[in-house]
Amino acid sequence: MHELSIAQSIVEIAEANARERKVQCIQTVKIRLGEFTTVVPEALDFAFEIARRGTLAENARLEIESVPMVVHCVACGTVTDPVRDVCLICPQCGLPLEVISGEELQVEYIEAESVARSV
C-alpha cells in the first residue's frame, strides 16, 4: 500500500511547515490529487489517519481535492477530458495526446493553530 508512504510524506511536509511557523497543532491538510495518479483517495485518507498518530497532525483532517485528467493533442491542439476511457490518442487526428492535468499530488495548504504557553 504505497498510500501509507505518501501519507507519511504529507505529514512530514505539514509538520515541517508547522515548525517553521512555530505552531503546535495542525488542524487541516489539503492536497490536490490528480485522477491520473495511481493513488486511491479512500486508501490515502485511511493511511493519513495512521501516519498522523503521535505528530503535530494528530487530530488533523485530510481534505482531498480531485483534479480531473485533461489531455491535449500536441499536433492539432484538441483538448479533451478522457473521462473513463483512458486513450491517449487524439480523436481528431490520431496522434498521441499529452497529459496537461491530472497527475498532481501536492499539498495545497495547511491550517494550523498556535497554542499559547503559560509561564
Image (cartoon, rainbow, N blue to C red):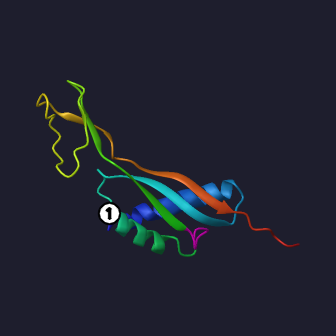
Quadrant into which the C terminus falls: bottom right
User: Which segment is the magenta one?
Assistant: 55-60
* Left or right: 41 as drawn, with respect to 58: left
Q: Residue shown at 57%/63% (left/top)?
A: 28
Q: Which residue is mark 1?
A: 40
Q: Secondary structure at mark 1?
A: loop
Q: Residues within 10 Å of mark 1 (few under 14, many from 20)?
A: few
- Looking at the rendering, which quadrant does residue 70 occupy? top left
* Left or right: 17 as drawn, with respect to 74: right
* Left or right: 67 as drawn, with respect to 72: right
Magenta-drawn stretch, dominant element (helix, strand or loop): loop
Depth check, front residue: 101 or 15: 101
Amino acid at dot 1: Val
Q: Residue furthest left?
A: 94
- Looking at the rendering, which quadrant does residue 47 occupy? bottom left
Position in image of residue 25 (x %, y %)? 66, 67
Quadrant into which the N terminus falls: bottom left
Depth check, front residue: 81 or 103: 81
Number of marks in the image?
A: 1
- Looking at the rendering, which quadrant does residue 66 occupy? bottom left
